[in-house]
């Protein structure tokens, strides 16, 4: 099926380029520019061409949609982009477009290799059924697996588990954005998101690399017990740069410093290949501040396009991890009831979702007005 999808991708690039080169000449602000075909091809190659995994992600959005026009709002594109995909997929007998704006998937085998999105309720229901537990969304995620393993949080690696509800939300976003059932990488996983992800979709294959041997042993134990497709490797990302295989995406939850983010993201990007990939970054603003400007520049240089930034959905339940944590605890306890403080978040984080563009783009220079949609 993957070979079929790669051939389909190549056909789409030709279809997409041919229509684009014809259509763009008629667009507002472009029709009077008299651009030759060579220049227009440069525009397509640098600005319009999608990677293999981005193509599959767009196919995914269409085949799993309740209304094909959701494709426009989800991807912040217009009806031209929607039509190109609908027309191509119908021509190749992948889908049948209904007058009701829904699609029928004709080549149903595709569902085996393109993961289906799931709601948080669906994920929660599956986890509760398989683990035989009741999920408490505000509790630390490691509490979910207490009866199966004995993981201990370690301050020396700045481990701090997110809440169960936060972890389920992250899994939902991975399933929403993951375009192909090939191996997905976790760079550190003291939140056990790899386990929740593979419990939610048994077809997903993961590799977890971490420096903590005990954590990896706990994940291995859970993978064995629930027959999950998880492989673990002990890795210090400061020393080892290549894992020897390419992944379709990765999740990293780095030390919340500028250098920590750069180190983890660079390591993960080295594990992606020519197909592109999706990158998930969980990070809170503990010691970064206005240096996020420098990180934005870093993301651009690493060919990472920000698709989504989600605040207010990931947080860490109360925990005393470092010596200085006791100081802020005393200060808060002096103002607010201790029971209330300890039931609320200790730290918040944002989830950044990037598309990795596997080829360099060049600026195509020519004189145009602000209204030239090119």
Image (cartoon, rainbow, N blue to C red):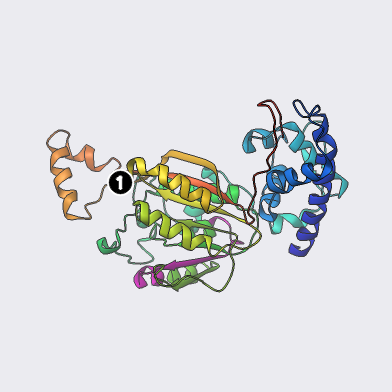
Vertical comparison of 158 with 30: above or below: below
Q: Which of the two residues, 301 or 80, is positioned nearer the viewer here?
A: 301
State the count of labels: 1
Residue drawn at x 70%, y 37% as measured from the top left: 366
Which quarter of the image is occupied by the C terminus? top right
Q: Where is residue 343 in the image (x, y as percent from the top left)?
A: 27, 41
44 relative to 358 in the view: left or right: right
Query: Does residue 156 show up?
Result: yes
Which residue carries the number 1 mark? 286
Q: Position of residue 53 (x, y in %)?
A: 66, 54
Magenta stretch in the rendered image? 200-218
Callout 1 secondary element: loop
Residue 19: quarter of image? top right
Q: Quadrant of residue 6?
A: bottom right
Between residues 68 and 187, which one lies in front from this camera angle? 187
Q: Which residue is drawn at 17% across and 40% down?
A: 338
């Amino acid at each position: 099926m993957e070979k079929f999808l790669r051939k389909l991708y190549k056909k789409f690039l030709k279809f997409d380029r041919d229509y684009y080169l014809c259509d763009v000449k008629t667009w507002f602000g472009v029709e009077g520019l008299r651009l030759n075909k060579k220049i227009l091809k440069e525009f397509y190659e640098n600005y319009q061409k999608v990677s293999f995994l981005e193509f599959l992600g767009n196919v995914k959005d269409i085949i799993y949609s309740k209304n094909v026009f959701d494709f426009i709002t989800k991807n912040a594109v217009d009806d031209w982009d929607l039509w190109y995909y609908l027309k191509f997929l119908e021509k190749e007998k992948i889908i049948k477009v209904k007058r009701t704006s829904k699609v029928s998937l004709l080549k149903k085998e595709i569902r085996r290799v393109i993961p289906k999105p799931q709601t948080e309720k669906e994920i929660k229901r599956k986890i509760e059924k398989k683990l035989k537990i009741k999920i408490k969304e505000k509790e630390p995620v490691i509490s979910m697996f207490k009866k199966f393993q004995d993981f201990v949080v370690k301050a020396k690696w700045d481990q701090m588990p997110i809440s169960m509800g936060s972890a389920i939300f992250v899994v939902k976003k991975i399933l929403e954005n993951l375009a192909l059932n090939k191996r997905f990488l976790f760079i550190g996983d003291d939140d056990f998101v790899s386990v929740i992800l593979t419990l939610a979709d048994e077809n997903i294959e993961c590799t977890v690399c971490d420096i903590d041997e005990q954590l990896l042993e706990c994940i291995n134990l859970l993978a064995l017990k629930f027959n999950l497709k998880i492989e673990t490797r002990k890795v210090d990302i400061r020393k080892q740069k290549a894992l020897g295989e390419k992944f379709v995406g990765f999740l990293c939850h780095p030390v919340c410093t500028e250098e920590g983010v750069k180190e983890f993201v660079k390591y993960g990007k080295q594990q992606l290949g020519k197909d592109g990939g999706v990158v998930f970054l969980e990070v809170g603003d503990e010691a970064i501040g206005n240096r996020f400007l420098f990180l934005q520049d870093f993301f651009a240089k690493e060919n990472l396009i920000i698709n989504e930034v989600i605040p207010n959905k990931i947080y860490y339940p109360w925990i005393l991890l470092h010596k200085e944590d006791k100081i802020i605890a005393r200060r808060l306890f002096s103002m607010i009831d201790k029971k209330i403080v300890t039931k609320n978040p200790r730290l918040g984080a944002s989830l950044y979702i990037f598309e990795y563009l596997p080829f360099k783009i060049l600026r195509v220079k020519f004189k145009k007005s602000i209204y030239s949609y090119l």
